[in-house]
Amino acid sequence: METPSYLSVQGLSKIYFGTTGGVQAANFELPEGSFFTLLGPSGCGKTTTLRCIAGLETPTRGIIRLGDRDFFNSATGANIPLNLRNIGMVFQSYAIWPHLTVFENVAFPLRVGREKYSSADIARMVGLALDSVDLAGLGKRSATQLSGGQQQRVALARAIVRKPSLLLLDEPLSNLDALLRDDMRAELKSLQGRLGVTTVYVTHDQAEALEMSDMIAVMRGGNIVQLGAPRDIYHDPVDGFVASFMGSSNIFPGTAEAAARAGAICAVQLVNGPRVLARARVDMAAGQSVVISVRPEDVTLVERHQTQDSQNALNGIVRSSGFLGPICNYHVEVGQLSIQARINSRTSFDKGAEIAAIFAADKALALPGDASPAS
Ligand SMILES: Nc1ncnc2c1ncn2[C@@H]1O[C@H](COP(=O)(O)OP(=O)(O)OP(=O)(O)O)[C@@H](O)[C@H]1O
Ligand SMILES: [Mg+2]
């Protein structure tokens, strides 16, 4: 049985007058409690989509429905104002007020909302919110006396204090340094799970998206180009753009030698490189331009005389190696190509070693489109 949709976004478009920016015909359905991420390069329309859901932006077309309420429906004219949507939001710049205490920052939505709360209720609700982000006891502090990570928690506490029906987070970790970001990533995910609040998260960081999300929408130029579980997007990207955006470092342009059905193994002549066997991601025509994507962890390095059974064995020379503890990262020169391999560090090859880079045909994807990670 299909999980019922909680947040439904259908044909959502926001076209800014006189520009090509915005978002075009976005569709997604989220079950209640899910963690959904809009992922893509700068300017691809992530914030625009989020602002439309929040009610900060009026869409040009489409439907945004939460539960059985139409937040926005261009066909019926429904458009619920943002203060009646009961949404918690954290912006990239936390936008906490420096002249207020931590307590008053978090209490703010309770004081300005339509619903009136007693002082006792406000104290209780703010206390719970501060507890849940591990800031209990800091209520009296001025917001300026907090670290970046603590300010980020205040912004989160403020977003959840009214028990929102939906949480929208726009790059909430981007102001933090790398270590803190990793910690906060796990913490945020666990808080979201405890609260069970359906969350739409925006980031351009693929590692963040992979680790946190139940489902990811990869966006490019205002369009959702792929929608799926992190595993599917990582291992089965629809095109060269998604593959490279999801961190695939071995992406090589080439030409399909013959027509092939989606899923079949096909031969591809790489530009300035050898001929390789790969799995066609979609139906391919003979002579079609494609890109090949092979994950560095799917490439193995062997002595040249050990390549007997390999479907793809490319003779190359080790140009560099980086020891990362459990694994070693190699760059191998194969003619004019540089192939990256990530292998168990117990095997080691010297710089300049003449080796073969091998990979199975079904681990190499032949994808339509170009490899450019540009927006
Ligand atoms: N108010 C506006 N008026 C005109 N164009 C806009 C407006 N807001 C955004 N755009 C354009 O719409 C496109 C999408 O912008 P958006 O802010 O949604 O991108 P983003 O994916 O959030 O990027 P970033 O990662 O840089 O925050 C961009 O081309 C942007 O220039
Ligand atoms: Mg943005």
Image (spheres, helix red, strand yellow):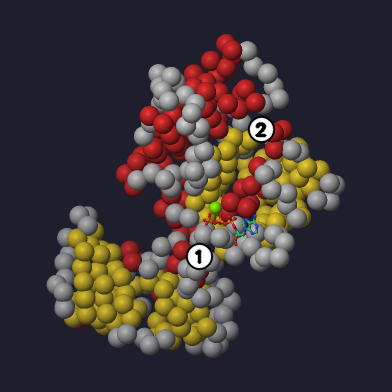
Q: Is residue 291 above or below residue 275?
A: above
Pinpoint residue 226: horizontal percent, then vertical percent: 57, 61
The residue positioned 51% from the left and 76% from the top of the image is 370
Q: Name the outermost residue toward the front.
A: 99
Residue that numbered label 1 is attached to: 242
Q: Residue at x 70, y 56 (%)?
A: 14
Q: Is residue 301 left or right of residue 231?
A: left
Nearest the viewer among 301 and 168 is 168
Q: How many numbered marks appear?
A: 2
Query: Measuring 52% from the left and 83% from the top, which residue is drawn there?
Result: 289
| Earlier-in-chain disc, 2 versus 1 | 2
Badge nearest the viewer, 2 or 1: 2
Residue type, mark 2 in image: Asn
Q: Is residue 19 above or below residue 118?
A: below
Q: Image quadrant of residue 35?
A: top right
Seen in the picture, residue 121 relative to 306 is either above or below; the reply is above
- Give the Cα distance between marks 2 and 1: 34 Å
Q: Closer to the camera, 333 or 119?
A: 119
